[in-house]
Image (spheres, grey):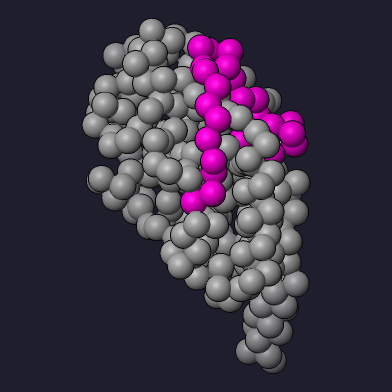
Amino acid sequence: MKRFYILICFLLSIFNSFSQQITCSTKDRQVFEDKIIEIEGLLESDFGTTIVAIGKTFKGIPYVAKTLEIGEVESLVVNLQGLDCTTYVENVLAFSMLLKNNTSDFDAFTKILETIRYKDGQLDGYGSRLHYFTDWIRNNEQKGLLEDITAKIGGVSLEKDINFMGTHRELYPFLKSDENFEKIIATEKELAKETFCFLPREEIEANEHLIQTGDIIALATSINGLDVTHTGIATREKDGRIHLLHASTSSMQVEVTKKPLADYLLQINKNIGILVARPLK
C-alpha cells in the first residue's frame, strides 16, 4: 500500500510538471528546498543588498552553458546545479522576490521565474523566451520588476541591428522549427524599431558611484547582431568599488570578480560598455 501511495505521488508530480511545462529534476527540487533554508534571514530593507546576499550563496556553483536548451518543446527549466550568466541572474532575482514576498512555495517560485524569463510573463513556446538581454530588460521594466537606469547614469544611445539568432540559425537547435524561427525573426523586427543605451566602458569608473549593490549589469558588445554577451550583478565590495557577481566563463563558476568592474571589462574582447537595470522593491 505504501509503495502504491509513493507511485501515485510520483505520477501526480510528473503530471503536474507536464501540465505546467516545467522541467525540474528531483535533485534540483531538493536544492530549491535547501536554498530556501539557506536564504532565511537574508532579507534586508535595501532590496539590492538582499539580492547580493542571496547571489553570494550561489558562489562556487558551476557555469554550464545552454541549460535551457532541453527537449524538443520549450519548458520552464529549473536548474540550480549549473547556471549560465542569464539563468544565474534570473534565479537570484526569483529567490529574492520570493523572500521579499515572504513565501517559500515552489509553485510561487516557478511562477516568478516564468514571469522574469518570458515575454509578458507567459511561457508560450521557444519564441516567447526573452533571448536578447535588451529585450529582457525592456520587457521586465514593462512588468514593473526593474528600471533601466543606463541613460540616467551617463548612457548614450546606440542604433544597431540585433539579429544574431536570425542570421545564425544553425547555432540554435530549436530554430530548426520554422515556427520558432519565424517568431525570432518577428522579435528581431520589433527590436529593429528600438535603440538602447549603454554606458561606454571608459565612462564607467567616473560614474560607478551611481551604480548600486544589486543592480543588474549587462555587457554590451561590438559583435555584429548581438546586444549583450554577458550579465551579472553589481556588488560594492570592501575596496569601495563596484565588482561583478556572476557566473563566470573564465573560472567556470559563480564568483565575484577580483578586479573592479571598470578594470575587469578592459580584458573582455569586443566589450564597449554596460547596461544597468535596477530591480524594484
Query: Would you place residue 251 above or below residue 69 in this image?
Result: above
* Residue occupying the point 35% across, 32% down: 271
Picture quarter with the N terminus: bottom right
* Residue occupying the point 62% across, 48% down: 188
- In depth, the one of 3 and 46 nearer the eye is 46
Res 137 quadrant in image: top right
- Residue range in magenta is 137-164
Query: Would you place residue 242 above or below residue 115 in this image?
Result: above
205 left or right of 96 in image: left
Q: Is residue 112 visible?
A: no
- In depth, the one of 107 and 85 nearer the eye is 85
Task: Indicate whether residue 146 is drawn in magenta.
Answer: yes
Query: Would you place residue 72 above or below residue 208 in this image?
Result: below
- In depth, the one of 252 and 186 nearer the eye is 186
Picture quarter with the C terminus: top right
* Residue occupying the point 43% across, 43% down: 224
* Residue occupying the point 51% across, 12% down: 154
Res 43 quadrant in image: top right
Instruction: Point out residue 28 in the picture as x, y percentages from the top left corner.
Output: 51, 62
Instruction: Point out residue 261 in the picture as x, y percentages from the top left corner.
Output: 34, 24
Instruction: Point out residue 278 in the picture as x, y percentages from the top left corner.
Output: 59, 25
- In depth, the one of 26 and 89 nearer the eye is 89
Instruction: Point out residue 127 in the picture as x, y percentages from the top left corner.
Output: 66, 59
Task: Indicate whether residue 108 is drawn in magenta.
Answer: no
Mark count: 0
